[in-house]
């Protein structure tokens, strides 16, 4: 991770367990120009119990209220072989891969693959054994904070700090774990509160519809943006409906890069190189309002201000009033002193 805004395209489980769809998602992420494409690593049996119910949004998006969360997630698992294929394809396409681990074994697996960066999902921020293992296995961490209180964020952060991970290697993402997140619940200012409270890099993991909120987050100072994307919002699965399609992902990434560049100035209010040429065109000089004879006194009746601004500045108006003409001037002629 470097100093620019890191854009993470969250493929998540939107591959629907199909390796070819995973490859297509990677292709879309490459075209969009993101920095990372992120997947999810889990064993369904380690993640949820047989009795775990699906969230309301999962029922709505899968259009299936009969199967359990366990049954749903088993269809969305990536095998070790599929992980290896995805990583190899990312290397071929020159895009960075990483993943979110949702259980202890998956943390071990990602570390064994040589990954140094791990993403802590919102649901694991109160999972002490998970957090302790992640802190031991990885060098850099991104923590999502959906559903969290500030005290819970502090407790999780301290686990990583106490394990020896430097504060500058930790990024905390403001997040709302509702798919899609209603605009009234975004509370984007909470991202700033997190940065002020904990002195870490901040970012935003977005589950709203559209691209405007992550763009606003960048304008507020987010260093990382994460956004779910899909090949088609109408595909069956829990996360497709609240994800961006490829063209939207591309538009978001372009907008973020534009905002990033717009924020890159030195903070000093001064004419930019590109606008210097327009100063004379847009500003005004003092002009003759009527024909003026040499020796005549300049008054509000015989002089005015007009473009261009390549003569006596209109800011010298009061200095010019009451002086005399050094020569004859025609109506609409630039005054000289």
Image (cartoon, rainbow, N blue to C red):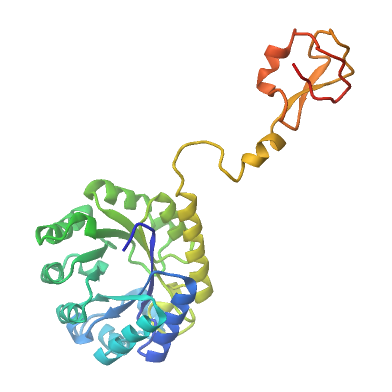
Q: Nearer the viewer, residue 282 or 44?
A: 282
Question: With respect to residue 99, does 309 lie above or below?
Answer: above
Q: Nearer the viewer, residue 315 or 123?
A: 315
Question: With respect to residue 194, does 118 lie above or below?
Answer: below
Q: Residue at x 89, y 21 (%)?
A: 330
Q: Nearer the viewer, residue 129 or 264?
A: 264
Q: Residue at x 35, y 89 (%)?
A: 17
Question: With respect to residue 198, does 62 lie above or below?
Answer: below
Residue 62 lies, in percent from the top left, at 40, 83
Residue 190 lies, in percent from the top left, at 32, 51
How many numbered discs, if any? 0
122 relative position to 163: left or right: right
Residue 229 visible at all: yes
The quarter in which the N terminus is drawn is: bottom left
Residue 10 lies, in percent from the top left, at 37, 73
Q: Specify the quadrant of the image occupied by residue 99.
A: bottom left
Q: Nearer the viewer, residue 53 or 206?
A: 206
Q: Specify the quadrant of the image occupied by residue 184.
A: bottom left
Q: Residue at x 40, y 50 (%)?
A: 220
The quarter in which the C terminus is drawn is: top right
Residue 28 lies, in percent from the top left, at 47, 78
72 relative position to 166: left or right: right
Question: With respect to residue 136, does 282 lie above or below?
Answer: above
Residue 48 visible at all: no
């Amino acid at each position: 991770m470097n100093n620019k805004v890191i854009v993470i395209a969250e493929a998540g489980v939107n591959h629907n367990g199909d390796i070819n769809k995973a490859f297509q998602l990677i292709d879309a992420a490459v075209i969009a120009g993101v920095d990372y494409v992120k997947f999810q690593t889990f064993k369904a049996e380690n993640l949820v119990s047989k009795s775990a119910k699906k969230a309301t949004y999962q029922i709505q998006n899968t259009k299936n209220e009969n199967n359990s969360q366990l049954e749903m997630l088993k269809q969305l698992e990536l095998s070790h072989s599929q992980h290896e294929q995805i990583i190899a394809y990312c290397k071929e396409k020159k895009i960075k891969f990483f993943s979110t681990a949702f259980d202890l074994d998956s943390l071990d697996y990602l570390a064994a693959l040589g990954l140094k960066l791990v993403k802590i999902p919102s649901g694991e921020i109160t999972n002490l054994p998970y957090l302790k293992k992640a802190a031991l296995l990885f060098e850099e961490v991104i923590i999502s904070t959906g559903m969290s209180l500030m005290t819970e964020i502090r407790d999780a952060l301290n686990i990583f700090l106490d394990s020896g991970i430097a504060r500058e290697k930790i990024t905390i993402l403001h997040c709302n774990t509702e798919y899609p997140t209603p605009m009234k619940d975004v509370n984007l200012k909470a991202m700033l509160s997190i940065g002020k409270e904990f002195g870490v890099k901040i970012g935003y993991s977005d589950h709203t519809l559209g691209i405007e909120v992550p763009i606003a987050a960048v304008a507020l100072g987010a260093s990382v943006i994460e956004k779910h994307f899909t090949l088609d919002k109408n595909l069956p699965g829990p996360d497709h409906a609240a994800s961006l399609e490829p063209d939207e992902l591309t538009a978001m990434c372009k907008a973020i890069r534009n905002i990033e560049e717009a924020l890159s100035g030195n903070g000093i209010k001064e004419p930019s190189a590109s606008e210097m040429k327009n100063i004379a065109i847009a500003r005004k000089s003092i002009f003759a309002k009527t024909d003026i004879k040499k020796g005549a006194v300049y008054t509000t009746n015989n002089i005015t201000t007009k473009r261009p601004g390549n003569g006596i500045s209109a800011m010298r108006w009061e200095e010019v009033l009451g002086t005399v003409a050094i020569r004859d001037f025609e109506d609409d002629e630039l005054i000289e002193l």
